[in-house]
Image: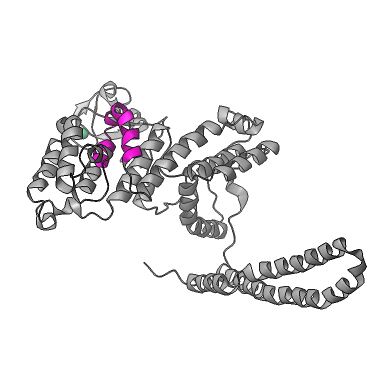
Amino acid sequence: MAPPPNGMQELMEQVELFEKTANLSASINDVHNTIDLLTTARAKIAADPQTAPLTLAKLQDPLKKSLEAAQKDIKPIYSGLGKYGKALDKRFKDKPLPTAENDALSSHPQLINRAIAMHLLREGEFSVASTFIQEANRHPPHAEPTLNTPNPYLNESWEKDIAEGTFNSEKLQEQFAEMYHILHELRQEKNLGPAIEWARARSDILEARGSNLEFELCRLQFVCLFSGHGTDGEDQLMDGTLHGPLQAWTYARREFGSFQRRYAKEVQKLMGALAYHENVPESPYGNYFSNDTAWEEVATSFTREFCSLLGLSADSPLYIAATAGAIALPHLLKLQSIMEKTRTEWTTQNELPVEIPLPPSYHFHSIFVCPVSKEQSTDQNPPMMMPCGHVIADESLQRLSKGARFKCPYCPSESHPRDAKKVFL
Ligand SMILES: [Zn+2]
């Protein structure tokens, strides 16, 4: 792991120290003791009111000690909190948050609420999600006008849903509950059954999407049977003596028929491994049988396909947006201070004036920058491909051609603008 950036080390040490020394269990115990003392005394007095003066007198000393212990045990919590607060202030002392001048979200509070609710649902935090939705419904957020949305109104049906309290999370919750059940079986129980059943029921849709999920799952099942881990219910019922490679062979004969067309080579390799069953790790097929990440890989594939079929991305959009935002923040702060110094203004409203170096997994849409105008293409100014294969933005095409035959700026070919084709990215 890369060392944490400057100053973060101290912060992490404080968190560690805090977790170790300042936990609340001692204080909670103290309070429980005090409550026990009081309830015992009350029961005694209730049973025999005559004993009240004596019981109360006897209670005084232990009760005082018990409260003192509670005071003493909570001290490290306060001091830990204080130290952590100081470390936080020290680390972030000259890091103000950007001003709200370019606020794009205040006009869409329902969008934020929905993103939070969806995030909780897809993380499997169903009860938290349902409390959140109830509370959001009881206090519908108020949309504030912003620069880009001066007249906020509820344009999308789901924005209305969450604002008017009709956002129905039950269906989604049911679906995610199924996803978590299958993931639990995969990761914790090493049981491929429910995932294979799910994939098989959607075989056609998955194949149409070019997904290999069903085969990946069945291949892992084959490998498990081959190595003697995991069971294949039917075979055991049929014949208790079948195990290892033989069980895998029976499984393949029964299940791999439908994979022959698409995965002939892969199936051949798995069958080839049977010939080396005495020493597979040393065989050319060894890598199939010693893949430590195989379970996590199928779990990830499954999550991706499951979410796609629900029309959702595999990763939580809220998580992605927050992470990308955290990466972008230092760049935006720097930009802001430069703009203040040079008294320049941020003129492009829908585009950031600086490039934010996001990791490749955060690149979702290919962009096209016209080589003539150096402008990024938009829906109004799409990339156009001329018959020679070169691509420029529509506005550049119109400007260069003036509606008549013209020479491509990048090669000798000539063409008419009406022969250029719109390129979809
Ligand atoms: Zn050309």
Residue 194, by quadrant, is: top left
Question: Does residue 199 belong to the magenta stretch?
Answer: yes
Q: Nearer the viewer, residue 41 or 134?
A: 41
Q: Nearer the viewer, residue 198 or 411?
A: 198
In the rendered image, residue 94, in percent from the top left (x then y), is placed at 58, 67
Q: Residue at x 57, y 67 (%)?
A: 92
Position of 187 relative to 4 (above/below): above
User: Would you say residue 144 is visible in this rendering?
Assistant: no
User: Would you say residue 103 is visible in this rendering?
Assistant: yes
Asked if residue 246 lies left or right of residue 352, the reply is left
In the rendered image, residue 365, in percent from the top left (x then y), is placed at 37, 40
The magenta segment: 193-218
In the displayed orientation, state which residue is furthest to the left: 275
- Main SS, magenta region, reads helix
Q: Indicate which quadrant contains ligand 1.
A: top left
Residue 257, by quadrant, is: top left
Q: Residue at x 59, y 61 (%)?
A: 96
